[in-house]
Each structure stands twice: as C-alpha cells, then as structure tokens.
Amino acid sequence: GRKPWKILGIGEEFPDEVPLRAEEITIPADVTPERVPTHIVDYSGNTHLICESTANVICIVYSVNNKKSIEKVSLPSVRTNNKQIKKNIPVISAQEVLSSSIHSFIFPLFPQCSAKNLKNISELFYYAQKAVLHPTGPLYCPEEKELKPSCIKALTRIFKVSDLDNDGILNDNELNFFQRTCFNTPLAPQALEDVKNVVRRNMTDGVKDNGLTLKGFLFLHTLFIQRGRHETTWTVLRRFGYDDDLELTQEYLFPMIKIPPDCTTELNHNAYLFLQSVFDKHDKDRDCALSPDEVKDLFKVFPYMPWGPDVNNTVCTNDQGWITYQGYLSQWTLTTYLDVQRSLEYLGYLGYSIIYEQESQAAAMTVTRNKRIDLQKKQTQRSVFRCNVLGARGSGKSGFLQAFLGRNLQRQRQIREDHKSFYAISTTYVYGQEKYLLLHEVIPDFDFLSEADLACDVVCLVYDVNNPRSFEYCAKVYKQYFIDSKTPCVVIAAKSDLHEVRQHYSLSPHEFCRKHKLHPKDIYTRLTTMAMYPHMAQADLKNSTFWLRASVGATVFAVLGFAMYRALLKQR
C-alpha cells in the first residue's frame, strides 16, 4: 500500500563507459526485504540536479580515491543547493570500495560498497528503505543518547494501555499479550527472563516484582534503537496507531462508520465490558466511584482532558460529587449517542481495538435501525431514548433534569452556573429491561426551534405553577410543532411546592391536556416507556382525568424529601 520511493544517487550496473546519468529504474517489491517497490533516480554532478521534493531518501556516494568527490557531495552542500528537499528526508552516504561511513544521525554502520563488483549494493538500498520505513530521527537523539520526548510520550501511552491491571508494571501475561499483539507471537518463558535480565543488568528500577516498569520498557526501546533495531520500536508504534511523526493517525482515531438518516448510535455489549474493565483498573479504592485523581489517571492516555466539570452535573455522582460507575457508563452512552466520532476517538486513546483485538473502534458501535421501521413494527431494539425538555425560562427545566439524577433543591443550588449541563442521563427500567433515558433541556426560543430541538423520542413540556404566563409557552410550542407529530408528549407542572396561580391562557392546563389527550405517566420510567412504544401513547384514551398530586413517582421523590412536580395526567 505504500508508494514507491525515489532514491537519488546510484545505478546497479558498471559499464566500461559510465554515462553521466543512468536510466531510472524500479526495484520490484517482491525482491526487497521490506516488500516495498523502490524507484531509483541517478544523478551526476555534471548535470543539473532535479531533486524532487517527493524524494523519500537520498543516497550520497563518493569515491575514496577522489577527494573532490567527497567535497562536492557533503551534506551541507546538498541542503544548501537544493532548498526544495524536505527537511526530514534521510540522507545516507556510501564510501565506495574502501571503508564504511554513514551519517551518525541515521545509522552507526554501513557496509563497504563497490559498484564495479556489485558488492553490498543491495544492502545499500535495504538501508535506504529502512531509513524511510523506520527512521531514527523521530525516535532518538544520538547526541544525548536518549529517546526524544515525543517518542517517550507515545511509548508511555502504549505502556499504560498494555498495563491491564494498572499496577505500574507489565507482568508476564501482559508482556506476552503485548508481544502477541505487536509481533503475532508470544515470548517463551526463558526469553521473557532474558529480556528482564538485560534490563536488570543495566538499571536498578527497570524490573519490579518480576515485572517490567515504565523505565525498563523505555530502556529496552532505547537499546533496540542503539543496536540498529529501530524497526522493532516502529512496529510497536504503528500497531498502536502512530504515524511517522508520532501522532495517532486519523484512520486509527476515526475509522469509517456509516450512519443512515433517522438511525442512532449505541455502544454494544463488548464496548461496555471494555469500559467496565477500564473503570475497574482505575478505581483503586474500590468505592465504585472515580475520585478526581482517579479520573486524571484514567485520562493520562489522552492528549487532553475530555471531561469538564459539567459532566458531574450530567450523570449520577456519589455524596462527594464523584462520578459513580453508573454515571461513568452513562456519560459514555451520552457521548456515543450525541457524537459518535468523539466516542470513536476516545476509545482509540484507550486502545479498545488493540485490547479487544478488533479491526477498529467501529466494532464497539451498534447503529440502530431506522426509527420509521420501529414505528411500523411497533417494537424497538434500542437502548437509549431521548427526551427533549421544553418550557419558558424559569419554568423548572433544570430542576427536572437534576431531580432525575437524584438531587434535591439544596444540592441543585450548589451547582455553579459555568458547570451547568443541558443534559442528564441515567438508567430506567421498562418491563424489567434496563434502558437509558437522556433528558435534554432545550433553550427556549419559540420563534425558532431547530431540527435538533425537535428530533427526539418523547417531549416533556414543563411549566411553573407559580407563574401565570408559564403554561402559555408550552401550549403554543405543542400546537405549532407537536400537535400533528408522532412524537409522544407529556406536560409537567413544576414547582408544585409553591402556590398555584391561574394560568393566562384560554384553557387551563388540566383542560388543555384533556383536549389533546396528553397522557398519565410516572414521569421518568414512563417517559422512557413512551419513547419505546410511541404507538401506545397515541391509543384512544378514556375521558376521565385526574391530578397526580404532591409527588410524581413516589420512589423518585420520596427519597428527595420534597415535592417539586406534579403532572397533568390522563387515565386510560
């Protein structure tokens, strides 16, 4: 799959009369050790050098019995005279006939060459290929005799991903898994011991509890490079998704995934198992919640912190405000539903496809079938349902979201404005099945509701019983956007602990719900049921109506110790 490389410098025959410039030739892939086609472009000092910027490597050849030839082809002159040469093109030099020489920043050794006797000519091109496929420059600083910072950063992430129990060492099982992942073969027990003994002989803290530490892991790669085995390090880097600049490739982070219209994205069973294992390895104190330090440790394999303080107000937390196990899985579910590309990226940083031996993170995703088919068949296999919460400003939407996460008014008042979230997600149970309900607070703007504001599985219209103009917004939104929609709706009377006032609308909320057949629901669980079975929500209803007073869903609000809402409900 790689393009042929153009090498400026050498031919492979030695005729009696040497031409100024040999014809361009291509060495086919099947005769090279690296299985890569190599395009060779010859050059003569007596002709104009067309040094193409697409060249991947330059071979400088000089004769030991001609001092001028050495002066003409010195590296500075090549760089100076040919400004189009890319900065990172490797340059190697071959000393004809007598000895071996190569610039120290590429390789420490190079075989003697003779064009006349064809001595080591194939080796020359092998090293030229190697300089491109497995360059030393990005990995190692020969002056300092140590790995470069970007290489250390990449190898550190690889170490953390491979450290499956997060104990700071790679034990024999983890080393074998790493070896099999990168090189398709396990290490024999004696070979493992030999590796650790090499590290022990060279450093005191490279092996701990008979396992390889990060320092020992980095030392081994330094040793590989110093011994000319940098292809070993490159094999590891590329297996874990890195390109030649030691950045994770776009192909690795964002694999192709097709999402047809009206379909949603969810994590599958294997993805949840993987995320559970990631949680377990970072929950050091085994309290089923992630402390700020544990969250920071989990995301050390990321180039940035992906979760802000708003996440703690989007999912369930413990009394200390730390994200619980359920909250952790809920946040991953939310990200996958709202932004599957970001979820793919995050799973890439965690090494999902490597640990679970999948082609890519796309294997972690389930694309649900078209919602119209679900409606036709009156059943769904989806696990995540979206409820858009609409209402005038100050109607109690935010409180409704936070109550879903089990937070009373006292805890809600502690939320900083810049830490506020417009989403809340947690699990509910519908007929014994665990489902995720995603509540989204829509910023009120009656004149313009976008497709995203309208696209959901169920609508929740919230009004403030203490504000006489609050219900009017709900009524107008319902009549303009949802009266002819197949999306189920429910009206929530919020702040029912306050004095109820008469609403300034032609119909009372009670009469409005009766007229438009807005349904009796036990709020959160029933919202999910409506989302799952919208056809049931549109069934003919009996005329009798009633108010569910004081609290909605006793199991939810009795725990909270206050009555925030009541619903305008209609009995079947």
Image (spheres, rainbow, N blue to C red):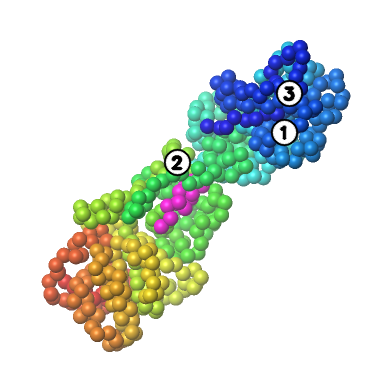
Report the quarter where the C terminus lies. bottom left
How many neighbours does mark 1 have within 10 angstroms: few (below 14), some (14-19), or many (20 or more)? few
Q: Which mark is residue 21?
A: 3
Mark 1: secondary structure: loop
Note whether 28 is above or below 388 in the view shown: above
Question: Where residue 287 sits in the image (x, y, percent)?
Answer: 44, 56
| Residues at discs 1 and 3 in contact (Cβ within 8 Å) | no
Note whether 179 is above or below 451 in the view shown: above
Instruction: Please name the amino acid that badge 1 sits on.
Output: Ile
Instruction: Please name the amino acid that badge 3 sits on.
Output: Arg
Question: Where residue 559 sits in the image (x, y, percent)?
Answer: 32, 70
Q: Give the residues drawn in magenta, as a range.
A: 338-350
Question: Where residue 280 sits in the image (x, y, percent)?
Answer: 44, 49
Identity of the residue drawn at 75% across and 32% down: 49
How many neighbours does mark 2 have within 10 angstroms: few (below 14), some (14-19), or many (20 or more)? many
Quarter residue 103 falls in:
top right
